[in-house]
Amino acid sequence: MAGNVKTQEAKSVHHKMNGGRMLIEALKAEGVEVIFGYPGGSVLPIYDEIYDSGIHHVLTRHEQGAIHAAEGYARISGKPGVVIATSGPGATNIITGLADAMMDSLPLVVFTGQVATGVIGSDAFQEADVMGITMPITKYSYQVRETKEFPKIIKEAFHIANSGRKGPVLIDIPKDMAISEDEFNYDEIEVNIPSYQPNYTPNHFQIRKVVEAVSSAKKPIILAGAGVLHANANEELRVYAEQQSIPVVSTLLGLGGIPGNHELFLGMAGMHGTYTANMAIYECDLLINIGSRFDDRVTGNLSTFAPNAKVVHIDIDPAEIGKNVQTHIPVVADAREALKALIAEDGARGDFSIWLKKLRNWQQEYPLAYKKEINVLKPQRLVELVHQYTNGNAIVTTDVGQHQMWAAQYYSLENPNKWVTSGGLGTMGFGLPASIGAALAQPNETVVSFVGDAGFQMTLQELSVLQEKNLNIKVVIVNNQALGMVRQWQELFYEERYSHSLVPNQPDFVKLAEAYGMKAYRATNEEEAESVLKEAMEYNGPVLLDFHVAPKEKVYPMVAPGKGLHEMVGVKP
């Protein structure tokens, strides 16, 4: 990969250049190191400029792969992922990724080609109303109508994408705007958007209310969401939790915000959360939500969610506060700034010893567990083995389904920013391309991509990129020959009527990987699994591992639809 690409042209130079060149110079000025994309007719002028730009371009094998790879890159690097797609089908192929990034607050700057301005609206070849289609699923969107405005638009796009509540920003570029010329003065542009002024600093009086609520509480809980990680507030979260002796539960996207082995961490909350985490929320008298939007998969039945709790909600997006759960103490602020303010207050510590003892008893009595069977590879055990053979230090990406939940439950994350998964949208096909972006963000680390046999087949063509770039990614297929989570719901709620959820006819995944020039292994029991994992982790490069697991294993505990967090089933195997 090219490192930080330097350019002399972008340094306050006033000379004319075409829109395609402006884009490249602006990306260099923003420190962009990698672009994910796929060329086509309307973006050929831009790709001609990419040719000798020095910026590392990753040609994914589908535009959906490009945008999910950019999401993985953004999640691990903390910098905006950059995507380029052509007009029409190129642009519509990235729609799922835009919606996914919007729901999970991932910063992307996405450039789509468009037909020339003179034929917009005429149903020209490969024309699509990208602005109209994407408006609800982007943080902001632009269409370039004058080349002279292009530099300002790009600078604003990067600012919007990576500030406040992060998210995807789209720039639609008519072909003539990429060809026509105007002056480029990127360094002199100042971003000033009066209608967009995110608030990072918490109100002092609201912080004092939180301090007073903690001092009078008997059973407090912190719910840590992805906002903690986006704000790089993991250390502040740990310090504050320890300072006040407040136990912490996490959302799916918040995993890693506090070390998984920390004595105050109770596990993930929600539909497949731990017994202790869910019961802690149900019985607490003070719930401090930091950077979570109270998603329905976390809350379960709202009428029984934290019924006895005073609710504190710390969030950088004021629109989320009070949207789903009544909030008694709202704090609109960056998670890190709010936690720093709370730590500085160093409020009177309550005596939570009885509460902590009760929680520890629950942890001992109702741990995550599963039944072991001879000569059968349980998926939970597979995740434990992957954790063992990576020393828990790998970057983990997942697809969506049962394997995603097992990874969340059994791959303990001791460090932040090593977890990449699709939360709000639940996008199958996400895991493999996301691993590409993660690997490029941290090229010296091992990446493990847990995928299901079904979701893997949605974007498996991206194996070509793993081989081409020799990325150190281990693709772990949790193969139960089914759409696992769909099959689980059909078993539990639809009288075992497995309507189109079983997938017995599959390709030979090992041969498939070998066709792409990759190493590949298959395992059907625990002994074989240990052997192939050892070999795979010792190899510095891409490996595909096809693990045949118990086909009818279910994800437990589980909060059924319409039930409260205290109404879990499958707590004990």
Image (tube, rainbow, N blue to C red):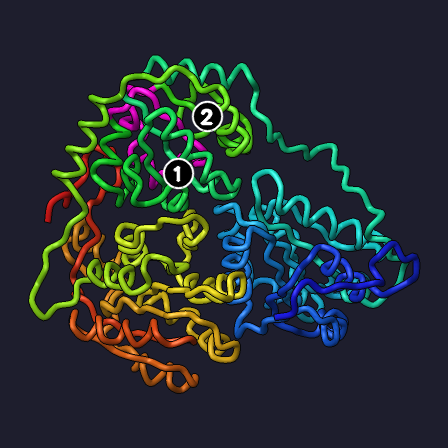
Q: Secondary structure at mark 2?
A: loop
- Residue 1 or residue 57, whichever sits in front: 1
Q: Residues within 10 Å of mark 2 (few under 14, many from 20)?
A: some
Q: Amino acid at mark 1?
A: Asp
For residue 406, the mark is none
- Residue 325 or residue 165, whichever sits in front: 165
- Picture coordinates of residue 545 (x, y %)? 31, 74
Kindly tell me whether residue 307 is visible in this rendering.
no
Q: Is residue 95 left or right of residue 56?
A: left
Q: Amino acid at mark 2?
A: Gly
Kindly tell me whether residue 297 is visible in this rendering.
yes
**Residue beneath the point at 23% across and 41% down:** 274
The earlier-in-sequence mark between 2 and 1 is 1
For residue 295, the mark is 1
- Picture coordinates of residue 250 (x, y %)? 35, 39
Residue 169 against residue 339 in the figure, above or below: below
- Residue 551 or residue 41, whichever sits in front: 551
* Residue closest to the far right: 15
Magenta-colored span? 283-309
Residue 311 against residue 366 in the figure, above or below: above
Query: Could you say which quadrant of the image residue 15 lies in?
Result: bottom right
Residue 196 against residue 551 in the figure, above or below: above
For residue 322, the mark is 2
